[in-house]
Amino acid sequence: MQYGRHIILLVLLFCCLQSRTQKAPFNFHHLTVNDGLNDGIINAIVQDKYGYMWFASYGALNRYNGSSIRKFLHTENDTTSPPGGISYAMFCSSEGRLWIGYDDGLVEYNYAADHFQLQQSTKKLRINSITEIGKTQLLLLTAKGAFVYSTTEKKLSPFTAANNKELFKQHYPLSLYKKGKQLLMGSYGGYILYDLESRQATFHTVPVFAGLGADRVMMDERGDIWLSNVFNFKLLKVTPSTDTVVAIDQLPSIRELKVQMSFLNFVADANHNVWIVTSLKGLIQYNIVSGELRFHQHQPFVPGSIAVNILRTIYKAPDGNIWISMLGGVDYFNPSQTLFSVVYPFPNADANLLARGFSEDDDGNYWFTTGDGISQYNTSTKKYKVWRNETGKPDQLYYNSVRAVLADSDVVWIATGKGVNRYNRITGKMEFLTSKDSLPQGFYLNINKDKSGNVWFGTNQNDGLYYYAVADKKIHSIATHPVLKKYKGYSIRTVFEDSKQRLWIGFGGEGVAMYDPQQQTTREWIFGKKEEKNSNANLTIDIKEDKKGVIWISSFHGLRGIDLQQKQEYWFTAKDGLRSNLVMGIAVDARDRLWLSSSAGLMMFDSSRKFFSYFDESFGLPAMEFPEHPAHVTRDGRMVFPSVKGYIFFDPLNYTEGKKAAQTYVASVEVFGKPFHTTQNFAECKSLHFHSNENFFTLELESLNYDNPGQAWYAYKLDGLEKEWHYTQDPKAVYTNVPGGSYTFRFKSTINANNWNTEEKSILIKVDTVFYKATWFWLLIAAAVAGLLYGFYRYRIRQQEQLHNLQSKAQLLEKEKALVMYESLKQQLNPHFLFNSLTSLNSLIQGADKKTAAGFLDSLSKTYRYILKSRDSETVSLIDELKFAENYVKLQRIRFEKGFDVLFHVPEEYHHRKIVPVTLQNLIENAIKHNIIDEDTPLKVEIVVEDDSIVVRNNLQKKKFVETSNKQGLANLQSLYMYLSNRPVEIKETNSTFTISIPLL
């Protein structure tokens, strides 16, 4: 191969191809010890299966999740901690296992147990590189050669080629790179290609590398081989198919640096670029299609530039981000995210960078205005032409403070703080317009052009608004305008013509007005209360129209929308999602999205007008603060926003919302402030079980968001305990005194707090119930209480039954006693009554009154027959008792003749009622016994029914002495009736009568 000739030809070709066209800068994120790194010397970088980034530094392993870094440090006498040596290589296998190569062996990180395991068969081997050559086989490049490690058998064996067992001894492998089924290994004087399927290997000589080792190797998408030698500052690109070599280190743009530097490592991305880290000159971007070479070096005034120029190694993660270790830490960027670029208003970056007005002329040149003059930027030559007043020289402008500029064909209108200049691009003449031109001097705020070619000049002085009419090529004041003259003297901030040729005028405190030239009418909008018309809401900055015809107005107090067709108005402020109420420029893209600059970064309002997206320095935005000037759109569709650090350019169509979702995990769990451990890694955890004394717990979330670190928002909710979601930037979900039960912890994250249409994850959580709060416990208590209550109830029932039995027995005894006593009373009837009856009968017989004697004897027999018949009966019918009483009265009338009389007045309806036998006889006998019977003062007894009782009443003429009375008859009768009726036997005595009431049964 004639490598020398090929190298010269390719170098010349490269010189012809390379371009100095300005490209959008990449946004580099920086990580240092201030962000949590253990130290700033990083030897190896890898991304694991979950998306975490691992950095092997001299003193520790560091794991980064996009917002914080966890350090894994060696602990003496703890074999589960990382080794105390230095790590030089890391690798994540296809099975997701994480391997770390140390200067004293191979270590695996166990996710579930959260500890590190040294593979004993690799002990005392310094491992420089690791890759996978099979699902269970790792290829290790060590200081003692190449070895195969079996991850299942835990054994180490020499790495050999099937076609040449001695190849790797003849050509010692120094570096390796795997691409598909091919393994590329750098060696002294060239490289080795190894086929993983056939296990065939061949060595390829590179004469330029004669005697030099290929310390780093790579194969790009075209199959070209990249080789570098660190100590001899060599970098080659070899094309095997044509045997050609490009000496990258000899390209003119690199030689112009006039410094020897090492090309330490390189990676290829998906956009045909090879990224090369150098020891002194930062990062080199080489496009393998165009051959274009571009340097990315540290720029002190650009926070998103690479942190330093002294780099160490580079790694391309599966998610597309490129990570670079360097002196002091790690930088990373996404080569696909080049949304923003910045163009300074002057060639000197140290000059006044605060941008104001912008315009693009017919040749595609940009015109910039600042507080220190204006400039024209030639987009072809990248050169500036500046107009600025300088001491001791003729004035080029009315004033260096220039608010706006308008390129109008061959004329450029310039609005300064003291008047308007007009520059002729053809003649190069600068005019100073005055009142003679109908444009008096003053502080001019804006210049705008309508579709008819008329140019409008807004100022806060004089008449407020002037316009250059194309029709007569003259400048006029609105004081002479038939309709707009009403706005004479207003402060005019901006003028905008909509798609219906209506003119919108933004005032500096008076809101906005709309002028319809077809209808010759105007309409005003004052935002807020009339008495607050000079508020920030009425200070207009910019006016634009979206694809639906809605007019949008920015102000110092939010964003306004006016939809004349739908007759609706909108007002968005910080409480609705704006990052700041100070909204400056507005631009509308082809997807009808609103792009808004503010005092707190750039925002995008989606086409549905529901969600805001935010852009700050972490997204590559060159500046966070934007002054109160309108936004612009170039002819090729790029948007231009003036900022405090120059003009920010970007193509809005290069941004798509939600293009890449961040992974969200539960990072850790604490119980009562102490770590909670499980047998499963939290990133894969589907359920958690807490004991009853572990119901105070914290779940810490993490969102692997590398593009916008620090902008992660979290939403979480514990179903079963909470009804509402928590929305916060605090990743810790804290729960205290959680009742026992089963719950579902739901969580998700976003970088846009107004858009939660993101993936949701969940973990089942079971909290044991304290035994005294458990259902089974209370069921047991309830059963015990029920048992006790039932036992007590049965005890009370038994007690009541015993008491009832005793009471029944006592009542029975009392009843028996009463019956006995009553029976005794009835028995008294026999001797007394019999004696009296026989005496009476004897008198009748001696008196020869046989008929009366016979009747007396019949009544006497009936009386005794009734007594014998009813002696075993507790009660008898009232009619039977009345008949018995009538027989008894007949006998007594014979005895006492006219001295005794009984009257019966008992209605027939009571005859069926019941009464105790011999009751009436005893009461009549009682009346006879206790009263004087005499024909002059006869004893009269009356038997009647009153109040459902049989009443026996007699006139009272008491005897002074009663011979046979024991005073127990009525008492016994009362006792007996107590057991037969709820109503008592009533005895009433007056001066003239004695009455006894017996309740009818």
Image: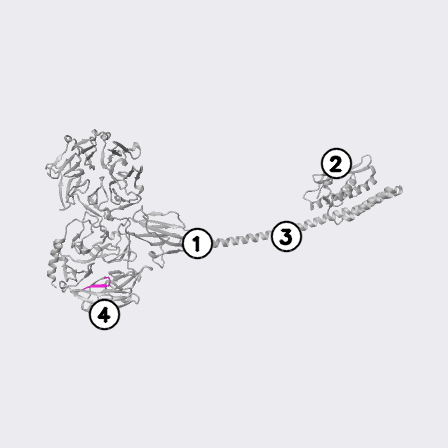
Q: Are marks 2 and 1 in contact (CB under 8 Å)?
A: no
Give the amino acid type for the residue marked by disc 1 in the picture: Thr
Using the numbered discs, state the Cα–Cα distance from disc 4 to disc 1 in whole angstroms. Answer: 65 Å
Using the numbered discs, state the Cα–Cα distance from disc 3 to disc 1 in whole angstroms. Answer: 47 Å
Callout 3: helix, strand or loop?
helix
Using the numbered discs, state the Cα–Cα distance from disc 2 to disc 1 in whole angstroms. Answer: 84 Å
Q: In this view of the protein, can residue 933 be seen by the observer?
A: no
Classify the position of the C terminus by image quarter.
top right
Q: How is the image coloured?
A: one colour
Q: Which residue is mark 1?
A: 769
Q: Residue 555 appears at what percent x and percent y?
A: 26, 38
Q: Which residue is mark 4?
A: 162
- Front disc: 3 or 4: 4
Choose between 158 and 361: the one closer to the eye.
361
Callout 4: helix, strand or loop?
loop
Give the residue at x 14% y 46%: 380
532 lies left or right of 201: right
Classify the position of the N terminus by image quarter.
bottom left
Q: Residues within 10 Å of mark 1 (few under 14, many from 20)?
A: some
Q: Quadrant of residue 314?
A: bottom left
Using the numbered discs, state the Cα–Cα distance from disc 4 to disc 2 in whole angstroms. Answer: 147 Å
Rendered image: mark on residue 993: 2
Q: Earlier in the sequence, mark 2 or mark 1?
A: 1
Q: Residue 326 appears at what percent x and percent y?
A: 21, 55
